[in-house]
């Protein structure tokens, strides 16, 4: 662990103007706050934040970031408060420490809910000041270095998976490849220990037999470049086990089939020398087709620049990967954003959103998530994926996930363009929207006049942004339709009660129902979260007792009369055939349960093993719930028209579910209370006359 004076000296070595007093006070405060706390390794807890600060000094970060690293666990793991941190160390450090701090655990939250909300809080703080991310990455890197001390395998694997899915991709997104590779390697050892050990053993055997290869090839490359008058530094290394394993998985190859397990880096002075070195290497050894990538003329979105190629060494009988870059490119590739971040020149607290547009897209994705599970899914999908590069007709480059389609491209350009997409041209040809894009495709999006993404797109899009936008649109449109249906239901109920829905009536009713406004009441009725009886009782206390029972359960107990049964004996109407008065019915007596009543041709009767009873509808039967399937045009107001027609024929909707939906139509399963088969037939006939309805039929499960 770094001693106090050693840490301060490190910072002063690259930043003589650093606030030495701030660093000293932060060090002492952290040591006192953590006190006798111990880590799983048995080391004093305060050794962790000090080591995190040490990692950040290697990146030559400013004094406030180093102080944040020293203090980053005090709010979460000690009695210290954010107010105390702000008072002692200033508002900037207080804000940064709060950004890194996890939310307090709420007992009612599940693990996924806590994880999702902590991720959302962290990403929002990161978007306002990227130093939050730098501290968090250093924190996670040190935790991964000490992960083996945690006793529970399940916890180790959970932390390793989170690192692989969230933090390593975040490091890659800001170009910090050193952090990314080390985190991936450490996580790999815990997630796939057998694979990690196998590759390490085979690499050791390869090293024993060809150990001089790296040194010999490095010398050959340097000599070749020098002979052509180019002074270059060449370094070589074996690829990491995780990188090898991922390549084996992607190519479905065994370790023995891989030939490019060595990589060499050529560092030169300027861009022109990069291309000159490339020409020299390709002139000496044959290039492996399809393995050349020019990230200098077309940098990655995280700013990474380099030339990548693979060549075949005749004498060595092996393929090697060669990366060619300038010294500045190398520094940026190692440290990414931290190598040139604005606040190092004094622009503290600069926002990351302008420098990294992908971060704005990620925040949009997280805001659109409807559940913690969806948020985590979208975050992983948005950050951890292979890439495809495609161009607009004007030459603008967009990075997309593997298997991306024109729909993904449209949403990458702008959310409005995605919502309005009706077609696409790829390389000048009109193609289906589900077409998979490949590197270098030029994509032109054909835009419609109306923003109406097709719900069916969700089945083939590859990007989190597109998927989240489609889901958001479906939820919003569904809500609008339910709201319109709820309005009809509430108005119909008010008409039956003969009341006017003014503030004098509605205000007290909302209070009794504990609902904040009329719109929420309409939505609750449409979603069947509130019955007619509940709303009637709230609007006019005592009204529900005067009305005939409306719920299916109430009718089964009081309003439905079945002759042929002993008075007082309980029975249940079959949930599958949904018998209504006028249907021919049969009863089945079960030795260990109530009597069930079915339509005479119910498919489930074949599975019944009880005694059959001759039963019929009683004269006092008031009605029952029937199930219908209605196919309607996918257009605004369709559900409202359906509900209005049903209400106009004195029937009540007691259940509603969306069965299927595409761009043109959607199919709804509706449970309605009817008086008889004849009443149901009248309603179906009326529904078929509704302009937005394609078909309406009675259905059984």
Image (tube, rainbow, N blue to C red):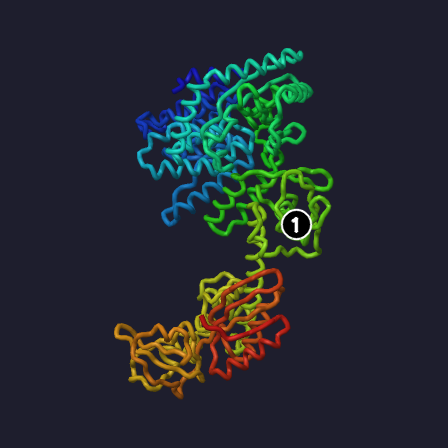
Specify the farthest residue to the bottom: 619
Q: Is residue 186 left or right of residue 351?
A: left
Q: Is residue 26 left or right of residue 477?
A: left
Residue 143: image x %, image y %? 40, 30
Count all numbered tags in the image, as a single digit.
Answer: 1
Task: Tell which of 281 and 559 is nearer to you.
Answer: 281
- Residue at 55% x, 71% y: name it: 630
- The answer to whether residue 95 shows anywhere in this view is no
Name the image quarter holding the C terminus.
bottom left
Residue 412: image x %, image y %? 63, 44
Q: As displayed, is residue 53 above or below residue 462?
A: above
Q: As displayed, is residue 620 above or below residue 59?
A: below
Name the image quarter holding the N terminus.
top left
Q: As displayed, is residue 535 above or below residue 99?
A: below
- Residue at 60% x, 45% y: name it: 404
Q: Is residue 581 left or right of residue 92?
A: left
Q: Secondary structure at mark 1?
A: helix
- Residue at 49% x, 46% y: name it: 375
């Amino acid at each position: 662990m770094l001693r106090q004076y050693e840490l301060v000296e490190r910072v002063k070595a690259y930043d003589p103007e650093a606030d030495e007093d701030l660093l000293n006070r932060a060090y002492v405060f952290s040591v006192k706050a953590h006190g006798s706390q111990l880590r799983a390794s048995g080391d004093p807890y305060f050794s962790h934040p000090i080591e995190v600060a040490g990692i950040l000094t290697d990146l030559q970060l400013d004094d406030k970031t180093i102080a944040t690293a020293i203090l980053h666990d005090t709010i979460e793991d000690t009695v210290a408060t954010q107010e105390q941190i702000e008072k002692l160390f200033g508002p900037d450090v207080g804000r940064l420490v709060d950004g890194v701090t996890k939310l307090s655990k709420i007992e009612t939250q599940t693990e996924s809910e806590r994880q999702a909300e902590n991720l959302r809080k962290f990403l929002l703080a990161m978007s306002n000041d990227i130093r939050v991310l730098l501290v968090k990455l250093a924190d996670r890197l040190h935790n991964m270095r000490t992960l083996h001390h945690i006793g529970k395998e399940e916890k180790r694997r959970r932390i390793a998976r989170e690192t692989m899915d969230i933090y390593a991709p975040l490091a890659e997104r800001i170009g910090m490849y050193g952090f990314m590779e080390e985190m991936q390697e450490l996580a790999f050892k815990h997630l796939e220990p057998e694979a990690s050990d196998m590759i390490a053993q085979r690499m050791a055997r390869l090293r024993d037999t060809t150990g001089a290869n790296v040194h010999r090839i490095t010398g050959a490359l340097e000599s070749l470049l020098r002979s052509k008058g180019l002074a270059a530094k060449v370094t070589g290394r074996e690829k990491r086990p995780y990188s090898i394993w991922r390549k084996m998985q992607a190519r479905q190859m065994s370790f023995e089939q891989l030939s490019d397990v060595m990589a060499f880096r050529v560092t030169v002075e300027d861009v022109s020398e990069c291309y000159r070195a490339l020409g020299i290497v390709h002139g000496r050894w044959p290039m492996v087709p399809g393995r050349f990538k020019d990230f200098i003329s077309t940098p990655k979105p995280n700013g990474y620049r380099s030339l990548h190629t693979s060549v075949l060494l005749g004498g060595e009988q092996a393929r090697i990967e060669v990366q060619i870059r300038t010294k500045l490119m190398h520094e940026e590739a190692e440290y990414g954003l931290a190598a040139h971040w604005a606040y190092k020149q004094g622009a503290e607290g600069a926002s990351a959103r302008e420098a990294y547009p992908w971060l704005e897209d990620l925040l949009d994705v997280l805001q659109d998530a409807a559940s913690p599970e969806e948020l985590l899914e979208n975050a992983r999908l948005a950050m951890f994926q292979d890439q495809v590069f495609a161009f607009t007709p004007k030459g603008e480059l967009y990075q997309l996930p593997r298997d991306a389609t024109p729909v993904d491209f449209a949403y990458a350009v702008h959310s409005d363009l995605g919502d309005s997409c009706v077609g696409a041209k790829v390389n000048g040809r009109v193609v289906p929207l589900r077409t998979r894009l490949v590197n270098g495709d030029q994509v032109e999006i054909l835009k419609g006049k109306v923003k109406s993404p097709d719900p069916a797109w969700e089945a083939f899009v590859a990007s989190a942004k597109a998927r989240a936008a489609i889901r958001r649109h479906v939820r919003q449109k569904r809500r609008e339709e339910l709201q319109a249906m709820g309005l009809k239901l509430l108005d119909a109920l008010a008409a039956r009660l003969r009341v006017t829905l003014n503030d004098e009536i509605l205000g007290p009713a909302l209070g009794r129902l504990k609902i904040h406004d009329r719109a929420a009441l309409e939505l609750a009725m449409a979603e069947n979260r509130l019955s007619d009886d509940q709303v009637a009782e709230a609007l006019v206390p005592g009204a529900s007792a005067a009305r005939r029972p409306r719920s299916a359960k109430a009718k089964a107990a009081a309003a439905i009369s079945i002759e042929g049964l002993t008075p007082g004996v309980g029975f249940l109407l079959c949930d599958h055939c949904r018998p209504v008065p006028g249907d021919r019915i049969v009863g089945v007596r079960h030795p260990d349960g109530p009597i069930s009543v079915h339509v005479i041709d119910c498919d489930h009767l074949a599975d019944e093993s009880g005694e059959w009873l001759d039963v019929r509808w009683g004269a006092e039967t008031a009605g029952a719930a029937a199930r219908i399937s209605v196919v309607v045009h996918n257009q605004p107001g369709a559900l409202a028209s359906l509900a209005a027609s049903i209400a106009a024929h004195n029937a009540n909707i007691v259940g509603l579910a969306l069965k299927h939906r595409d761009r043109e139509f959607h199919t709804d399963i509706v449970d309605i209370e009817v008086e008889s088969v004849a009443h149901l037939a009248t309603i179906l006939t009326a529904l078929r006359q509704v302009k937005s309805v394609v078909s309406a039929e009675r259905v059984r499960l």
